[in-house]
Amino acid sequence: MKEATKTRSTGEQVSVTIDGREVTVPAGTSVLDAALSAGIDIPHLCYLPELGLPATGSCRLCLVEVEGEKGPVASCVHPIAPGMVVRTDSDELREYRRTVIDLLLSDHPHDCLTCEQAGACDLQKYAYLLNVKDSEYRGESVWPDPVQDGPAITYDKSKCILCGRCVEVCQNVQVTGAIDFMSRGFEARVGLPPAMPREESVCVECGNCIDVCPTGALAYVGAQGAGRQWELDRVTTVCPYCGCGCLLEISTRDGSIVDIKGAPGAGPTRGLLCVKGRFGFDFIGHEERLTQPLIRRDGELAPATWDEALDFIASRLSAIKEKHGADAIGGLASAKCTNEENYLMQKFVRAVIGTNNIDHCARLCHASTVAGLARAFGSGAMTNSVDDLAEADVMFVIGSNTTECHPVIGAAIKRAVMSGRTRLIVADPRAIELTEVAELHLRHKPGTDVALINALAHVILEEGLADEEFIRERTEGFEEFRKAVAANTAAFAEKITGVPAEAIAEAARLHASAPAASIIYSMGITQHTTGTDNVFALANLAMLTGNIGKPGAGVNPLRGHNNVQGACDMGALPDVYPGYQKVVVEAARSKFEQAWGVSLPASPGLTVVEMMHAAAEGELKALYIMGENPMLSDPDVNQVEEALKKLEFLAVQDIFLTETAQLADVVLPAAAFAEKDGAFTNTERRVQRVRQALDPPGEARSDWSIICDLAARMGYEMSYAGPAVIQDEIAGVTPIYGGITYARLDVESLQWPCPDRDHPGTSILHREKFTRGLGKFHPVEFIPAKELPDEEYPLLLSTGRILEHFHTGTMSRHSEVLDKLVSVGAIEISPADAERLGIEDGKHVTVTSRRGHIEIAARVTDRVAPGVVFLAFHFKEAPANRLTIAALDPVAKIPEFKVCAVKIAPAAAQ
Amino acid sequence: MAENATPDRLVSQGPSEDDVVAALDSLDARPETNLIGALQEVQDRFGYLPSPALEAMSERSGIPLSRIYGVVTFYAQFYTEPRGRHTILCCRGTACHVKGAGRVLEAVERELGIEEGESTPDLMFYLETVACLGTCFLAPVIMIDNEYFGMLTPQKVAAILQNFRAERQ
């Protein structure tokens, strides 16, 4: 963001006079920004600072008079100077502006009567303000029909005023570079390269161009004819997809969503959205939503009343608890649900059922982060903030396909690189979008992260690049660590990882020499049997180079779900209460016993995968699942299915009849994110308000109220007027959330730790000291993945996500736009392997592992290296997790989704 | 040689991957700093800007393809459709007209089997007419690339074109 850089680089304050008022702003500020900061509005059409769009001075509407200048100047690109005297309004300026509007209207249809943008159109606004009724320059116009390149976005050249906002946002903020001005004169338009189909272009259909369009030339197809601007109700809430925490402005009319836009300048990502957040909302009003409780009768799920369903669940759980004990029951909370719901869910399992068998899908994504960073630093969360990324001199992205899995943070990384400030190192087995802009791509073999990271540390130590002062004053365990990496030379790592030793050394020097180097990682690090070791290795690297507790640095795990951070914070984990207070620590236990008025079990409960194992062995008899779909998300789903079928009782509350719900004895219809109030905590520990925009369909209810009713039926009073009151209870027992109230969340967002009501929240952790006091080095050594390719299963399968879909597809695959973009999965295979195995691009193949097989189309691409294949796990038709192995990290119990062995053959040959 | 060029045939004759690589390897202008210059060089080589060359240029330079096409479509000098490598400009200025430029143009068209604004199927020549080449003392005159051919008759035209082609094959 050029503007941000400009403002940051100058500390000096300058005073100018605008319309007779003295205004003091930082040197380098434009006249327009100075005026806006003083509340003086100057008409403008091309400038839009909220999203970080650089000023281009193209629309000429923001002309002002500056004393001493010959003629009027464009205020958006005219920097202030000390003592400058500016006039923003005069008869002459009005005449200039009228001419600008007049010229724009000369080639613009005056169809405000039927235009979708009427009421929100900047051109219309200024025509009205400046009283321009018609154009004096009207000539013959050539207006081609609107074009629609993708499933969601339409472009009407007749309405386009060529202000360039969409081009700027696409090129410089989203940094996709899909569209630009094409042609010239009356032919000029905005678009993709001529004659290029969208699928072949780099366009990601993010729709950020729509948000910035001042006239409605760029628009969402689905909103056409769905309502006039003044008929829409607007609610600001938080995106339900990944952990970026983008704020959404949902517009509704008559109980359904018309469109979703970013909130310009607001939230951690300043209003930028990705294709999922903006267009992936059809699931909310989908006809397949659950609308009434279902109870299995004679083998079939049949409609029931809430009373019947809740009474049935209560009696079954009570009976099983009585017969087999509380530990025969487990509960799964949800990374999709609110903090309040997760808090109540774990409270229900602990206080009402009486077991610590509570977990959720964080086990499958960042359990190793929570375990590793908590041990190393004392806090298992992202140390720095999204905003802070731009401060990094070097970014080391490892095991994160950021532009697809956290698209808006991916854009922030690309912006930082494009600005010239940040140098990027990417370590990833695949050639991903970020590797295109990276200075170094370390293409290591999946599952060799420890060898790679230790080798970076080895080079840094060898060449004397370590931050000795930081190590001495702020850490412990360094000597053991030094010994552990002594044998892990770059040459050793080259043999293990396949990355040339020289490239490792170069990366190490680049990383260690940066004043501020940040580490960004995701599931490529965590989803291994050595997941916790991988995290330790990264924590070691950060401490070794003194990159903790300062801007532009840190260890930054990107969390996968909208509220997986919050669900962990709320104690939806088998070993900790809310705020990571350990169940084995007596003081913590007695505190919660007192707060909840019950006695609590002292030993940690089972994790997700352990619960499945216990169910398969007949030890776990009942499972209560809130908004999770282990039938697609867990490793080795054949075994999961067996386990769930073996349960005596399974209850599921969800928004759809998921693959898991189909196996349940009782299914409860839940409200989706847009149908309830609450709070989500994003990947950077930022707690933000979720606000209700719609009523739930049919009899569906919010998860928190369902849990309350169920608890009451089981003899434990849970009575709350609403999420605000639940948050008050959370604050009372959770020190890191201690200062968070709805009164505050209504006007701001807060990053934990926020211990009291006057605390502003914490953007960077471990500033003066680590949460645990001293940072602790953990010596780790390379251990190979559990199941490696062999003669029978010669290929290494890695699994993950793609941009257009999310998790098990419950939301994204019920959305028309996303489904049109990508309707089926495909397995990525290298050209060399494909040729050897006789596999053609687009043709079906059978993929087989020791645990199962699937049939899926092949995508022959050099994104993957020879010997490696990649599969997304969103598609129920070809569930990747039929193949994956349920081998667990010994500390975090996270499964090894990233490495297992498979064989592939053309489908016809089977 | 006589049949008219059709777009399909022309496209099928686009440059090979090796041609594109060779063209980009030999650029004097760096696209990052002198995009227009680089585009001119590519166009000089192929007679137009083949899309594979622009895509490869985008990939090498990191300049978004949209940005490259933005420049290409802005300037009248750039062509994105296949076009003969050697441009014949037939002068139709007053002096040439009086001295029989019409017959010269006819001769060119007859010899190449194309009309004004078209390319030969082998993409050797592209034919255009211009208002004046500023060399009226050579009337009637044509130009092939940067070379003048003056005092023409229809007979001379055929020989010039045949020689030009022979020298380059």
Image: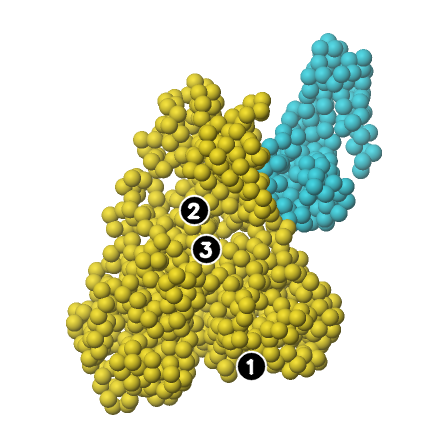
Chain colours: A yellow, B cyan
Q: Residue A452: x percent and y percent?
A: 65, 72
Q: Is residue A653 left or right of residue A685?
A: left
* Disc 1: host chain: A
Residue that carries the numbered disc 2 in the rendered image? A264
Nearer-the-camera pick, A226 or A265:
A265
Circle on res. B165: none
- Mark 2 lies on a secondary structure that is loop
Q: Amino acid at mark 1?
A: Lys
Q: Amino acid at mark 3?
A: Pro
Reading the image, the residue beneath label 1 is: A786
What amino acid does circle 2 point to?
A: Pro
Callout 1 crowding tier (Cα within 10 Å): few <14, some 14–19, many ≥20? some
Can you say whether A436 is above or below A486 in the image? above
Mark 3 surroundings: few (<14), some (14-19) or many (≥20) residues within 10 A? many
Residue drawn at point x = 41 percent, y = 31 percent: A123
Pick the front one: A283 or A850: A283
Separation of residues labelled 1 and 2 (CA atoms): 47 Å
Residue drawn at point x = 57 percent, y = 51 percent = A415
Q: Which residue is mark 3?
A: A268
Q: Residue furthest top?
A: B98
| Above/below status of B111 relative to A634 | above
Location of residue A167 with respect to A682 vertically, above or below: above
- Same chain, marks 1 and 3? yes
Residue located 63% across and 31% down the image: B75
Q: Is residue A741 above or below residue A39?
A: below
State which quadrant residue A593 falls in. bottom left
**In the rendered image, is residue A198 in sight?**
yes
Please, what secondary structure does the residue beneath circle 1 have? loop
User: Which class describes the residues within 10 Å of circle 2: few (<14), some (14-19), or many (20+)?
Assistant: many
Decide which of tag 1 and tag 2 comes sooner along the chain: 2
